[in-house]
Amino acid sequence: MRTHSASWRAAAVVASVLLVGSIAACGNSDTGSDGGTKDDGKITMGFSQVGAESGWRTANTISIKESATAAGVELKFDDAQQKQENQIKAIRNYIQQKVDVIAFSPVVESGWDTVLKEAKDAKIPVILTDRSVDSADKTLYKTFLGSDFVKEGRLAGEWLVEQKKTASGPVNIVELQGSTGAAPANDRKKGFAEAIAANPNLKVIASQTGDFTRAGGKQVMEQFLKANPKIDVLFAHNDDMGLGALEAITAAGKVPGKDITIITVDAVKDGMQALADGKFNFIAECSPLLGPQLMDLAKKVHAGETVPARIETEETTFTSAQAKEALPNRKY
Ligand code: AHR
């Protein structure tokens, strides 16, 4: 009897250990890769998107959603409507929900340390995608996947320097900046300014945010045109603002691409069409197709693998002739 009771108790202990183990294995990981908890292999990603401000952003959202489905990643998606507080709220929700990986494209560069620390304390790995943060503590996130925005600005500026190398007098440039405080706005401005410093004739006479939107680009360009009788060049930090500016330029009786040289960034289809039509003159590409690499990275960090701290997107530039050639195969 005693023997029977002892062996029954032993069996019960083994059974309960197995049960607890199987419950842990059934749910999503509680702790993510850092905590080493085993799960069923299905990854849940919480993603906070900037908003829907541009053609680039729309293409980026589609890429992320399609890639998640293809990779078997369960995606929780939130649109922050260009507000940092909305992103912080979304990230806190994802932490509460104990997702396996958090990914986001930060609206602005600064002010992320507290929430990133919360994610780290909860042992949920964070991947920055498209845009980075200026946190000094690089252990707050696993990797940053995205473009080199300074390089994009520099490529735009270098093209202009080459075009205007024989200019004998001042070349007046107006600049439509992206959203204030956003990494691509800060960096493209910096790269462009560095490049055009090679020719003292090239002067930025006005620079203002158009918030990366068509409406913003149109409105600010109207003001630029009213305030400045001689504008030779427009550098817009994205295609959408450049496209909005086209309307203002045409309404002011000027010919875009001829009276005013137009340089933009992104190379989305509408921008490429404007370039092929000779309304834009040059585009530095910024690729939104980050989804497949993001899912791959999510799987790796979830599995506890080490990934490179920085993964740079491959990009090129386009002249009008190159845009005509590339347009038929352009995916976004
Ligand atoms: O962060 C990428 C930038 O954000 C794109 O250049 C712009 O179009 C978008 O809104």
Image: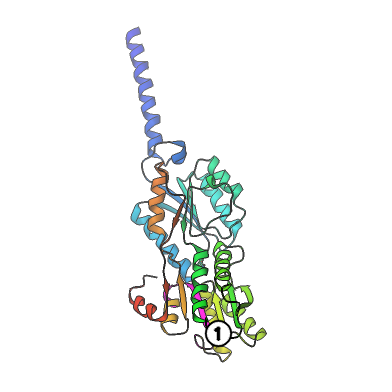
Tell whether position 190 is magenta. no
Indicate left or right for 213 with 315 as reference. right
Q: Is residue 1 visible?
A: no
Say which amino acid is labelled 1. Ala
Outermost residue toward the right?
227
Report the front residue among 172 and 138.
172
Q: Is mark 1 within 8 Å of ligand 1?
A: no
Please determine whether, in this image, residue 155 is positioned above or below residue 223.
above
Please determine whether, in this image, residue 182 is positioned above or below residue 39.
below
Outermost residue toward the bottom?
253
Q: Across the whole image, how many numbered discs are drawn on residues?
A: 1
Which quadrant of the structure image shows residue 39? top left
Relative image position of residue 46 (x, y in whole percent): 47, 51
Bounds of the magenta segment: 257-270
Q: Which residue is at a point 57% across and 80% down the rendered structure image?
A: 218
Report the front residue among 296 and 63.
296
Relative image position of residue 71 (x, y in whole percent): 35, 53
Q: Which residue is at a point 59% across and 58% down the rendered structure image?
A: 84
Q: Which residue is at a point 47% across and 62% down the rendered structure image?
A: 147
Relative image position of residue 62 (x, y in whole percent): 41, 64
Report the front residue among 5 and 304.
304
Relative image position of residue 309 (x, y in whole percent): 47, 50
Residue that badge 1 annotates: 167
Which quadrant of the structure image shows residue 168? bottom right
Considering the image in quadrants, where does the N terminus appear?
top left
Q: Is residue 234 visible?
A: yes
Q: SS for tag 1? A: loop
Considering the image in quadrants, where does the C terminus appear?
bottom left
Indicate left or right for 232 with 19 as reference. right
Label 1: few (<14), some (14–19) or many (≥20) C-alpha neighbours in 10 Å: few
